Amino acid sequence: MNRISRILNLVLIALTHKIQNQQTQSQDNEYFHKLAAHILRKCFKIWITTSQLKIRIQ
């Protein structure tokens, strides 16, 4: 889980850096938003599966 949060942090840093850059094209922003959404979905799936496993073990 710690690894996931570090990855998300890096994505957020990249996003804010891109947005702050005045030469940013809307296409780039769209790509980064899609990437962030994709990573969030992946992390959420991992989180759900691990929590389901914990419930089964108990």
Image (cartoon, rainbow, N blue to C red):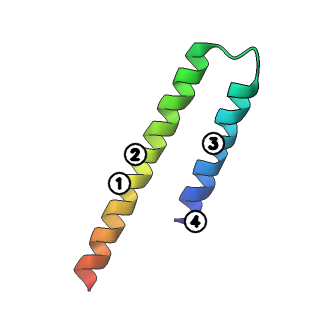
Looking at the picture, how far across and down is residue 55, in whole percent? Answer: 26, 77
Q: Residues within 10 Å of mark 3 (few under 14, many from 20)?
A: some
- In the displayed structure image, the side of residue 21 where residue 9 appears, left or right: left
Q: Is residue 12 above or below residue 33?
A: below
Residue type indicated by callout 4: Asn
Which SS class for mark 4?
Answer: helix
Name the secondary structure under disc 2.
helix
Discs 3/1, front: 3
Residue drawn where x is 27% and y is 83% of the image: 57
Question: Residue 52, percent across and down?
Answer: 27, 69
Marked residue nearer the N-terminal end (3 or 4): 4
Circles 2 and 1: CB atoms closer than 8 Å: yes
Earlier residue among tags 2 and 3 = 3
Contact (CB < 8 A) between labels 4 and 2? no
Res. 12 mark: 3
Disc assigned to residue 45: 1
Dot 3 and dot 1 residues touching (CB under 8 Å):
no
Callout 3 secondary element: helix
Q: Which residue is mark 4?
A: 2
Q: Amino acid at mark 3?
A: Leu
Question: Which residue matches tag 2?
Answer: 41
Crowding around mark 4 (Cα neighbors within 10 Å: few <14, some 14 to 19, many 20+) is few
